[in-house]
């Protein structure tokens, strides 16, 4: 396997890890920044919408830009923008400044999200086997590092401006180092022969051979045979549903244990911890499952397991059962969204960035919508039964998993 492809894989891991670390460092500083700027919870909630709006805008811009200039050009610039912007909330002295800072941070995060996923698609195409879940696991690990580092500096009373400034400096160093390892721009407009299409990705981006390919029908090959706008819309809709469920877990797992089951605050926090830990572990294993059984099996089985886990949590009679349910939900969701991103990126190599942006953008809106949907619903029914709505959404994804095709992808020599 050629050195440049290995280096491209290392660089992709580095950028996913960096993205998770940057956003995690912002998240752990939210209470401190809120106190420093003198705003309340309600105003903070409104300002956080600017973060989401910026991310969506960044995704929409980064997709076509990546297709035009290549991930090698857009990814480092996006990482530098996101890294530089992370310091801005720590410098904000009031609500207007914080809003502008969050908008810029969202734009940086959105462009980085799309460009790094587009580069991940190029690396995956070169390897001819699933890698996307492992890259997304690196994002989760970056968030864990941020939580640990944030806890350390917050205990010592360091100012958010100093910590986030140091974070920005580290990110620029990582960006400079990882940029040298990125893949050269692939000739996306080169047409594929029928034989290449059947080889699960047409060989590595760098030109190396693909072996044992005649029987391959993995995510690379199947997606490239179908590049219709309708397919991309369906992939985006499924991402919306799945990430809505992830957003529900992010915001409602802890309140569920505290308010429904009466758990103490420390114990209630374990609900999100169980979900996040299981999701990270599942992403580390999902590529192997996808390589053996195919992406549709991961999507079908994962969404079914997620539905079962969330149903278990929603109907749990006690805290241990609820914790198990949230963990099962994380394990089930872990490999699903990466399959959709991978399929979108491979659907048309010449429009990989734009297609990833469409799927990621709608998925991101789903993550924002999750908490907003459950909140009003709790005015009609208790929180436990309200959580059965995302259970139904997981079952919809399970039923629609045929949009992907099972098969075993090829591997590079």
Image (cartoon, helix red, strand yellow):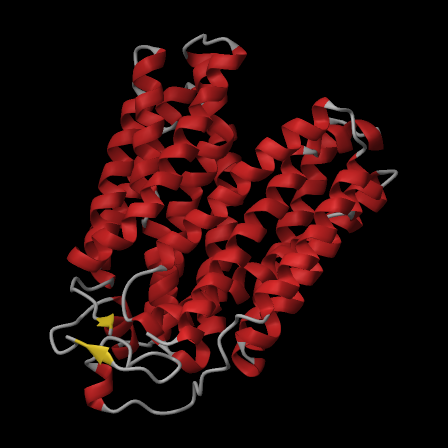
Number of numbered markers? 0
Horizontal relation, residue 410 to residue 155: left or right: left
Is residue 156 placed above or below 53 in the rendered structure? above
- Going by the image, does 98 lie left or right of 182? right
Query: Which quarter of the picture shows residue 244?
Result: top left
30 left or right of 187? right
Residue at 16% in and 64% down: 407
**In this view, which residue lies farthest toward the left?**
215
Residue drawn 44% across the image and 70% down it: 355
Q: Quadrant of residue 56?
A: bottom right
Query: Is 67 in front, or is 79?
Result: 79
Horizontal arrangement in the rendering, residue 76 relative to residue 141 (left or right): right
Q: Is residue 392 above or below residue 254?
A: below
Q: Residue 403: percent from the left, percent from the top?
A: 24, 62
Q: Quadrant of residue 263?
A: top left
- Which image quadrant: the N terminus? bottom left
Q: Position of residue 297 (x, y in %)?
A: 19, 53
- Look at 18% across and 70% down and name the residue there: 217
Q: Position of residue 236 (x, y in %)?
A: 40, 60
The residue positioned 47% from the left and 47% from the top of the image is 366
| Quadrant of the image containing the C terminus | bottom left
Q: Residue 372 location, x and y as percent?
A: 53, 36
Specify whether residue 44 is in view: yes
Q: Can residue 381 be seen here?
A: no
Q: Is residue 74 above or below residue 306?
A: below
Of the pair 137 and 219, the residue shown nearer to us: 137
> Where is 107 relative to 90, above or below?
below
């Amino acid at each position: 396997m050629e050195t440049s492809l290995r280096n491209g894989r290392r660089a992709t891991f580095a950028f996913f890890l960096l993205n998770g670390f940057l956003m995690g460092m912002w998240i752990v500083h939210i209470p401190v920044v809120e106190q420093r700027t003198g705003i309340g919870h309600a105003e903070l909630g409104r300002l956080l919408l600017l973060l989401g709006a910026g991310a969506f805008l960044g995704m929409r811009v980064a997709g076509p830009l990546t297709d035009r200039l290549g991930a090698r050009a857009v990814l480092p610039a996006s990482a530098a923008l996101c890294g530089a912007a992370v310091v801005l909330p720590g410098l904000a002295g009031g609500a207007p400044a914080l809003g502008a800072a969050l908008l810029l941070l969202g734009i940086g995060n959105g462009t980085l999200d799309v460009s790094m996923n587009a580069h991940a698609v190029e690396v995956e195409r070169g390897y001819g086997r699933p890698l996307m879940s492992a890259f997304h696991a690196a994002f989760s690990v970056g968030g864990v590092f941020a939580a640990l580092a944030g806890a350390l500096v917050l205990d010592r009373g360091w100012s958010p401006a100093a910590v986030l400034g140091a974070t920005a400096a580290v990110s620029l160093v990582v960006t400079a180092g990882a940029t040298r390892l990125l893949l050269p721009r692939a000739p996306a407009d080169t047409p594929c022969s029928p034989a290449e299409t059947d080889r699960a990705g047409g060989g590595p981006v760098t030109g190396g051979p693909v072996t044992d390919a005649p029987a391959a029908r993995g995510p690379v090959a199947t997606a490239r045979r179908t590049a219709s706008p309708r397919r991309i819309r369906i992939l985006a809709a499924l991402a919306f549903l799945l990430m809505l469920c992830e957003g529900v877990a992010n915001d409602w797992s802890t309140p569920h244990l505290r308010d429904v089951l009466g758990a103490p605050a420390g114990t209630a926090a374990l609900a999100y911890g169980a979900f996040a830990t299981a999701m990270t572990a599942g992403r580390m294993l999902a590529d192997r499952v996808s390589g053996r059984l195919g992406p549709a099996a991961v999507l079908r089985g994962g969404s079914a397991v997620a539905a079962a886990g969330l149903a278990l949590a929603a109907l749990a009679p006690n805290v241990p059962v609820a914790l198990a349910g949230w963990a099962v939900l994380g394990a089930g969701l872990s490999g699903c969204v990466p399959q959709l991103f991978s399929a979108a990126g491979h659907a048309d190599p010449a429009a990989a960035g734009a297609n990833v942006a469409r799927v990621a953008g709608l998925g991101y809106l789903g993550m924002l919508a999750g908490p907003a949907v459950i909140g009003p619903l709790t005015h009609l029914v208790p929180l436990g039964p309200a959580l059965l709505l995302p259970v139904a959404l997981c079952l919809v994804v399970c039923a629609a998993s045929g949009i992907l095709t099972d098969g075993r992808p090829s591997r590079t020599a």
